[in-house]
Amino acid sequence: MNIQGKIWGQTQCLFLKNNVEIHRIEAKKGGYCSKHKHDHKYNAFFVESGQLKITTWKNDYSLVDETIISAQQMSVVKPQEYHMFEAMDDTVAYEIYWTEISQDDIVRENCGGNTV
C-alpha cells in the first residue's frame, strides 16, 4: 500500500480488513503526531526499534499518562482517549487498530412477549 509522508516521518498501511488495521510507521527523533482520539478504535503501538513516548489523556480519572516503550514493547490506548506519540529516537513501530464487539451492544425498547 502507499507510503504517506508526515511531518514526523512516514506511515504505511499494511493491512485493513473488517475490524483490524495495521500501519508501519517510521518516526524521526523528536517527531510527534497530533493530539487526537478514535471514536471506536483501540490503538496499540508496538516498537520494532527505537523508542516512543505515548501520552494519553485518561477519561477514567484526571491524569495525563506518559509511557515510554522500547523495542519489543507495546502500549494500548482505549477508544475516546486523546493521545499522541513522540519519537525519543529514530523509531520503527507498528500501530495496530481494532474495534471490539460487545455482547451488551443492545438497546431494548420493550421486553418482547407472546401474542398467543
Image (cartoon, rainbow, N blue to C red):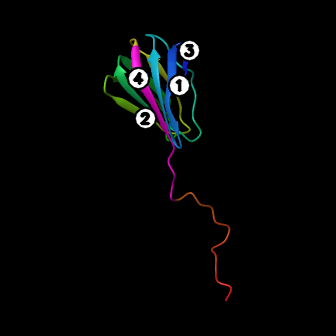
Going 33% across and 28% down the picture, which residue do you hit?
73
Q: Classify 10 Å Cα crowding around label 3: few (below 14), some (14-19), many (20 and above).
A: few
Q: CA distance from mark 1 to mark 2?
A: 24 Å
Q: Amino acid at mark 3?
A: Gly
Question: Disc 1 vs disc 2: which is toward the camera?
Answer: 1
Going 35% across and 22% down the picture, which residue do you hit?
48
Q: Is residue 99 left or right of residue 76?
A: right
Q: Classify 10 Å Cα crowding around label 2: few (below 14), some (14-19), many (20 and above).
A: some
| Along the viewing direction, whichever of 50 and 18 lies nearer the viewer | 18
| Along the viewing direction, whichever of 111 and 59 lies nearer the viewer | 111
Question: Disc 1 vs disc 4: which is toward the camera?
Answer: 1
Going 51% across and 54% down the picture, which residue do you hit?
102
Q: Is residue 32 visible?
A: no
Name the quadrant containing residue 38: top right
**Residue underneath mark 4:** 93
Q: Amino acid at mark 1?
A: Met
Mark number, residue 69: none
Question: Disc 3 vs disc 2: which is toward the camera?
Answer: 3
Q: CA distance from mark 1 to mark 4?
A: 17 Å
Q: Tell me which numbered mark, 1 or 2, is placed earlier along the sequence.
A: 1
| Along the viewing direction, whichever of 41 and 56 lies nearer the viewer | 41
Q: Tell me which numbered mark, 2 or 4, is placed earlier along the sequence.
A: 2
Q: Amino acid at mark 4?
A: Ala
Mark number, residue 5: 3
Q: Secondary structure at mark 2?
A: strand
Q: Is residue 46 visible?
A: yes
**Residue underneath mark 2:** 76
**Magenta stretch, overall SS:** strand
